[in-house]
Image (cartoon, helix red, strand yellow):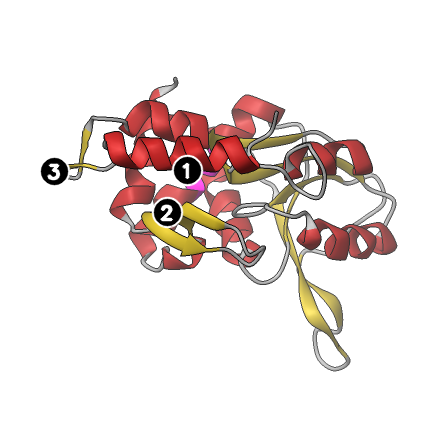
Amino acid sequence: MEQYKKDFIGFMVESEVLKFGDFTLKSGRKSPFFMNAGAYVTGMQLRRLGEYYAKAIHDNYGLDFDVLFGPAYKGIPLSVATAMAISELYGKEVRYCSNRKEVKDHGDTGILLGSKLKDGDRVIIIEDVTTSGKSIEETFPIIRAQADVEIKGLIVSLNRMERGKGEKSALEEIRDEYGFPTAAIVTMADVVEHLYNRECQGRIVIDDGLKAAIDAYYDQYGVK
């Protein structure tokens, strides 16, 4: 596993974005882990988060693209922080773009924040985590309605590696339905591999009991 992925896993735990315990998800599933990207709230956290995304985008998609599109609302700071990090780390200038939840009819009008989309733009969509693909269902038509663009792929921070609507993972379902590749900075398999019976932030985060609970969760909801 690349060092930046190991660092990112520790960063999620340190920032209390990735938590372990007993959680009920929107889907109704009882999960032994939960991720909340809304817990990234400081300037330092956002700077580091942007760097991890930038490195993952570079590894998975290269830098041959023009726009980072972050679906409202959590995708807005992700697209801004990552565009800044790509400029800083790789000297590549990309534009950020996000959608509004409501169309604005005065001043900076329209449904988009940041850059407008232009015909021929190559776009990478950036999100925190995808469990159902609902966000893409909402934003894909918005992107397509703005201009004739090429979507190069979707990047999320964590691949939960569990079934979406069917037997495939949500990321696999998005890939198959919309025809563009999907990737994550890390997967839950990476998280378990890195944290199991290893000290992180001065404690063992995933011990034998939690590992058994995660295994049981994936026996029930994991991708076959």
Label 3, secondary structure: give it: loop
Q: Residues within 10 Å of mark 2 (few under 14, many from 20)?
A: some
Answer whether residue 186 is magenta in the image: no
Q: Does the residue at mark 1 contact the one at mark 2 (Cβ under 8 Å)?
A: yes
Give the residues drawn in magenta, as a range. 50-54
Q: Which residue is mark 1?
A: 51
Report the amino acid beneath label 2.
Arg
Looking at the image, residue 118 lies above or below residue 3: below
Disc 3 or 1, which lies upstream in sequence? Answer: 1
Residue 118 visible in this rendered orientation of the protein = yes
Residue kind at label 3, given as amino acid type: Gly
Inspect this view and state whether residue 4 appears: no
Q: Nearer the viewer, residue 212 or 44?
A: 212
Q: Is residue 92 left or right of residue 117?
A: left
Label 1: element kind? helix
Q: CA distance from mark 2 to mark 3?
A: 24 Å
Residue at label 2?
Answer: 47
Q: Residues within 10 Å of mark 1 (few under 14, many from 20)?
A: many
- Indicate which disc, 2 or 3, sits on the residue closer to the N terminus: 2
Q: Choose mark 3 or mark 1, whichever is in front.
A: 3
Q: Are marks 2 and 3 in contact (CB under 8 Å)?
A: no
Q: Examine the image and state in which quarter residue 212 appears.
A: top left
Residue under pointer 3: 202
Residue drawn at point x = 36 percent, y = 37 percent: 213
